[in-house]
Amino acid sequence: MTTVPARIIHRTIARDWRTVYAFAARPEAMPLWASGLAAGLTRDGEEWVADGGPIGDVRVRFAPPNDFGVIDHKVTLPNGIVVDNALRVVPNGDGAEVMFTLLRQPGMDDAAFEADAAHIARDLDALKRLMEDKETPR
């Protein structure tokens, strides 16, 4: 069995976990905090399409709405490579813990892995700021 290096990037958010999940799981809200989807997502059947910029459009399939805080999603790149992303929101006292498991992709060097981790950290920081602002869009 082969495994790859992984890193769990997380943020504690001072807001009820169900509220964080309800907001973060909405594909329409993701451009507000997930910079890789800043151009927005367009629904196409069971999938969502995002403008991937110079690499072309990417397709995203999300886990169905659930009571467990799971926002896992598969991203299909224009070249056909599928990247599995595990994103979870779990209770942490009266607040929430948001965790993204970053898996190092085949052929990814150390610098690219660190850059991906930093990118995800910035996105989770943005989600934290939005969720802790009492005027968070619904």
Image: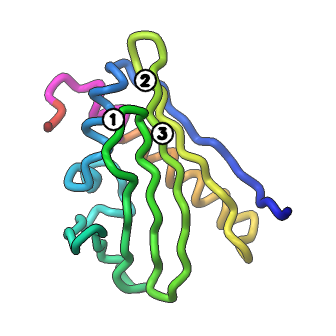
- The x, y position of residue 85, in whole percent, is 52, 57
- Residue lying at 51% horizontally and 88% vertically, measured from the top left: 79
Total marks drawn?
Answer: 3
Magenta segment? 127-135
Name the mark on residue 99: none
**Disc 3 versus disc 1: distance between alpha carbons?**
8 Å
Q: Earlier in the sequence, mark 2 or mark 3?
A: 3
- Under circle 1, the secondary element is helix
Is disc 3 in contact with disc 1, using a CB cutoff of under 8 Å?
no
Q: Which of pointers 2 and 3 indicates the residue nearer the eye? A: 3
Quarter of the figure that contains the C terminus: top left
- Residue lying at 37% horizontally and 18% vertically, measured from the top left: 14
- Of 34 and 103, the residue lying toward us: 103
**Disc 2 versus disc 1: distance between alpha carbons?**
9 Å
- Of 13 and 62, the residue lying toward us: 62
Query: Amino acid type of disc 1?
Result: Tyr
**Disc 2 versus disc 3: distance between alpha carbons?**
10 Å
Query: Amino acid type of disc 3?
Result: Arg
Q: Quadrant of residue 130?
A: top left
Q: Earlier in the sequence, mark 3 or mark 1?
A: 1
Name the mark on residue 96: 2
- Under circle 3, the secondary element is strand
Name the mark on residue 21: 1
Name the mark on residue 88: 3
